[in-house]
Structures are given as structure tokens and as C-alpha cells.
Image (cartoon, helix red, strand yellow):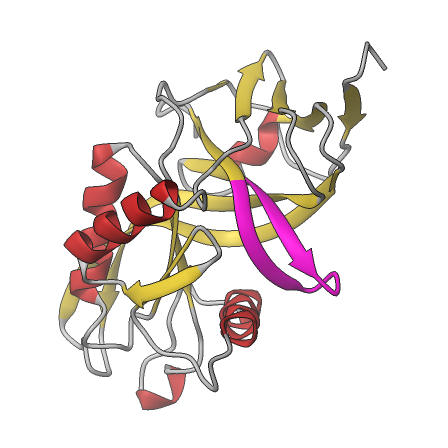
Amino acid sequence: MSGSSTVYRIMLACGFGLLALPVAAGEPQGVVELFTSQGCSSCPPADAALKTLIDDGKVVALSYHVDYWNYLGWADTLASKDNTARQYAYAKMLGRNGVYTPQAVLNGRDHINGADLAGINRRLTEMTGKGQGLAVPVSATVRKDEVDIKVGAGSGKANVVVVYFDREQQVEVKKGENGGKKISYWHSVRDIQTIGMWDGTPANFILPASVLNEGKNGGCAVLLQKMKDNETPGAILGATTVMADKTAN
């Protein structure tokens, strides 16, 4: 412990450590979590909108593939039960009776059609103006074989959640509503882990850098997120993204 800052060293089971570099970007203006499916004909425009957000570099953008459309004839190759569970948990928090795709959850507080790029940007701007933006500074930097995560000071308590994703994948969808199409997906989530708690005081968390390279051109987002009953995700107070080096295997 140094001053009022606490350092947590997180030891994870992982593969070989490879060189990784942080993304050079300013403080993100928001977090966009897109819930999508390869089996949904309405989703490709939302997947493209997410790519635009990623290219703009102003938000933390994540793509969660869900599995509840698999019965339509194509099993989403990037879907997981955990992704689907996260969307249902958001539905509970938002007071909704069900889920849909493409759905974009903004800052863990509200939702919108994931294909509505203008609406997403407008809603994030409105949230910031209402004090519902990312008020707590969060950073993640790769130093040799470690990822150094720093969370600044703020009010309240929250979980430190790491969301691991693959930078880009192309999938040939052979059946279902998108059958015959080759679709590109970005920042597809492959795992979610809570690595610690934050109590309003500055804190550091250390991860092995090799976790960034377990997928395809991997990376991770760090979300400082309030939780209800330790299972229902709530407001996101801060966030950042760190990517593996493009030359990593």
C-alpha cells in the first residue's frame, strides 16, 4: 500500500505472455455494449455502427453475441451463455420484460436500438450533461509482462470488471436469416471477469499481459460498474480499453 492507493495483483491462469501495447486515446465519452447475433437479420447494420464507434475512438465499444436466436437455423459462433445472461440481467435492471437484438446498452444506464448511431451519440451526450457519464478516471497500461490498471477517486462503491474480446473476426454465416453472408465483427466478447472491488479511493490492479493474447488479436475493456445484489449490472462510472499489439500471435 502506498499512500491512499491500494495495489491488487491478480494472478490468472493464462497462456504465454506476448508483447502488448495500450491504445493511445483520451478519456472515453461513454460505454456502448451491443447485444447482437449472427442469426438476426437486423443486426449487421448495428455491427457496422459499432465499427464506426470503434474507429471514432471516443467510446468503449463491446459486442456481446447472444445465443437465443440459434434455434432459427444457425448457431452463432461467437455467442455464449454468459453474454446472454448479461443482457437478461440488464433487462431486469432496466425494468424490461424481455430482450431484443440489436440492443445497445449505454453506460449501463439506458438502452437504444444498436443500429441507431446518431441516437447513440446523442444519448451519450445527454447522459454526460446529466452527470451520468464516466466521472471516475480509469486507465490500463501494459508494462513489460503486466497490465497496470489504475482507478481514480470518486464516490460510491463498484466492481472492477474486465471484459476480454477479440479485435476482429470474419464469419461466413451459412444458414439462418443471414445465410450466405460473410460478416465482420469487432470487439466480440469472449469472457467477463470481476477482478476486484472499488470503494471510492484510488486503487491499482495488476493482470498478466498474456491475458490480452488468449483470443484473436485480443484486448480488454476495464469497466468500473455498480452492481445490485452482486449479480445485476448497473451504472458504469469509468472505463478504458487496452489492446494487444497487432504483431502478437
Which residue occupies the foreground of this view, 179 or 82?
82
Q: Is residue 184 above or below residue 86?
A: above
Name the quadrant containing residue 70. Answer: bottom left
| Identity of the residue drawn at 38% across and 32% down | 28
Query: Where does the image place residue 15, in percent across and percent down from the top left?
Result: 64, 35
Q: Does residue 169 appear left or right of residue 163 in this picture?
A: left
Q: Position of residue 166 (x, y in %)?
A: 41, 44
**Quadrant location of the C terminus in the rendered image:** top left
Q: Main secondary structure of the magenta part?
A: strand
Q: Is residue 21 above or below residue 238?
A: above
| Image quadrant where residue 85 sits | bottom right
43 relative position to 207: left or right = left
Q: Quadrant of residue 56?
A: top left
Count of numbered badges drawn on the protein: 0
Of residue 176 and residue 106, the one placed in the foreground of this image is 106
Magenta stretch: residue 234 in it? yes
Q: Residue at x 52, y 37 (%)?
A: 238
Where is residue 114 shown, x and y percent of the image?
26, 63
What is the residue that sits farthest to the right in this orientation? 1
The residue sitting at 26% across, 77% down in the picture is 40
What segment carries the magenta color?
Answer: 222-237
Residue at position x 59%, y 35% in the image: 211
Q: Position of residue 31 (x, y in %)?
A: 41, 46
Horizontal side, residue 71 vs residue 47: left or right: right
Vertical order, 115 against 137 (above or below) = below
Q: Is residue 39 above or below residue 108?
A: below
Asked if residue 40 is among those painted magenta in the image, a careful observer would answer no
Quadrant housing the N terminus: top right
